Every structure is written in structure tokens, then in C-alpha cells.
Image (cartoon, helix red, strand yellow):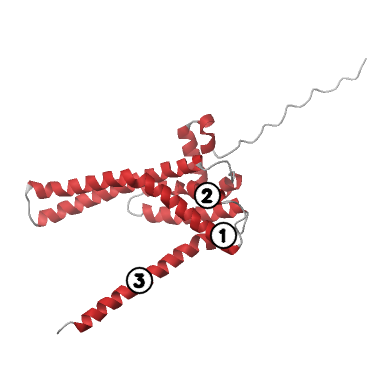
Amino acid sequence: MGQDFPPPLPPAPRAPQGTPWERRDELGAVPALFETTKQVLLTPSEFFGAMPISGGIGAPLAYGVIVGYLGALVQGVYQAVLNIGMGSAFAELGDRSPLSRLAPMLHGGLGLALQLVIAPVLIVVGLFIAAGIYHLVLMLLGQARQSFEATLRVVCYGQAASIVMILPLCGGLVAALWRVVISILGLAQAHRIGHGSAAIAVLAPIVLACCCCAVAMLFVFGGIAGLASHLPR
């Protein structure tokens, strides 16, 4: 009687490939969108550590545009309501004709409609510009260990912070700060570099832009002061 061998063990299940959003055909679009946003916001290091650094930019770009558009929609509604409220208040101080009361509503509504039409284009342009700047700084630092696609993926999925814009008043500021943190953690994981180099790539352009604005304001105020000194007294 021959020796009985145990049946072979079943193969170990393979780990899911890609981000939840890139598996939306399997998970469903809405659950994949929700799960991706939750992971980016709450566990960014783990998310970007498992994120593929290649495979096409279509899916990450679509995610960035969708989530960024939702944030722009919320901010646009808040701004329209603010404009209408302020316009109505000013109208109460002056002319109270029906046209003056209707003008703030028309202005706020048209502004919101225009913003929502051009928002997707602005979001796409902004994503590529931000990724290009980050990648350029990484290249200057000698820390661009992966391709531009890896950097663009980080920037696109970092748009998850736009959801925070739903918070009134402080939503924009909180979203911007959260996006900075996510970008630093994401670049560090995607390029397998230290957090210091990733922080320089993200913060250096911000600091440079602030310095340029400060210098420009000094020139403007200096020019105004110079003109004022030459006015007759």
C-alpha cells in the first residue's frame, strides 16, 4: 500500500493590485472613490507605499479631477452665497429698487456657473504644474528616484484633501495644509526618499512664491509712497 501524501495547499491569495480607485470595476465607482479618499486622508503613508508608480495616468488623473471638482463645487457655492449676502446688504444701504436686489443674485449665480464650467480645466492644469514643480525640485536635489508619473500620481491622489473644503470658513485653509502633509508623505513613499527631501520639494516652491509676493508688495508700496511724496501739499 503506497504512502498517502496530503493534498497540496491552495495557492495563497494574491494581494489586490492598484489603488481602490484603480480597481473600481471590481469594487464599484462610488465605494472605490470613498475608500481611496479615506485611505489617502487617514493612512497616507500606507496608501502611497502600496500605490503602483506606473500603469498610466488616466485613473489617477480622473480621481484628482473628480475630487477636486467636488471641492471646487462646495467652495463655489459658499462664495456665491457670500457674494449674494454681501451684495444684498450693500443694496439695503442704497438703492432699494428690485433691480438692485436682483443684481447680487445674478452676479453670484453667473460667477458660480462660470467657475464650475472652467474648474475641470483649471484642476488638470494645476495638477500637472504642481507635479512638474515637485519633480523638478526632486531632480535638482538628486532625489527623483522614479519617473514623473510617480510624482503626478501622488499629486492626483493628494486631491483627496479637497473633500475637507466642505467645512465652512476654514475648509480651504485646512485642505491646503492637509494637502501639503499628504504630498510630503506621498513623495517620500513613491520615490523611496527621506521625508526631509520630500518636504523641501513641497515647501520650497511655496516659500519661493511667498518671497516673490512679499518683494512685489514692497515694490508696490514703495512706488505708492514715492508718488505720494511728490504730490502737492
| Mark 2: secondary structure | helix
Query: Mark 2 Cα within 10 Å, few/some/many (few <14, many 20+)?
Result: many
Q: What's the amino acid at mark 2?
A: Val
Q: Judge whether 69 appears above or below 12 on screen.
A: below
Task: Note whether residue 164 is visible.
Answer: no
Q: How far, Cα to Cα, is label 3 from label 1?
A: 27 Å
Q: Quadrant of the C terminus?
A: bottom left
Q: How far, Cα to Cα, is label 3 from label 2?
A: 32 Å
Q: How far, Cα to Cα, is label 2 from label 1?
A: 14 Å
Residue 216 is labelled as 3
Is 22 positioned to the left or the right of 98 in the image?
Answer: right
Is 167 positioned to the left or the right of 95 in the image?
Answer: right
Q: Judge whether 16 appears above or below 218 on screen.
A: above
Please tell me which residue lies in front, 65 or 43: 65
Residue at mark 2: 154
Q: What's the amino acid at mark 1?
A: Leu
Query: Tag 1 or tag 3, which sits nearer the N-term?
Result: 1
Residue at mark 1: 138
Please tell me which residue lies in front, 26 or 233: 233
Identified at 61% across, 62% down, the residue is 142
Identified at 60% across, 44% down, the residue is 50
Q: How far from the left and from the top, in percent, is residue 158?
A: 48, 49
Query: Tag 1 or tag 2, which sits nearer the N-term?
Result: 1
Please tell me which residue lies in front, 10 or 137: 137
| Mark 1: secondary structure | helix
Query: Tag 2 or tag 3, which sits nearer the N-term?
Result: 2
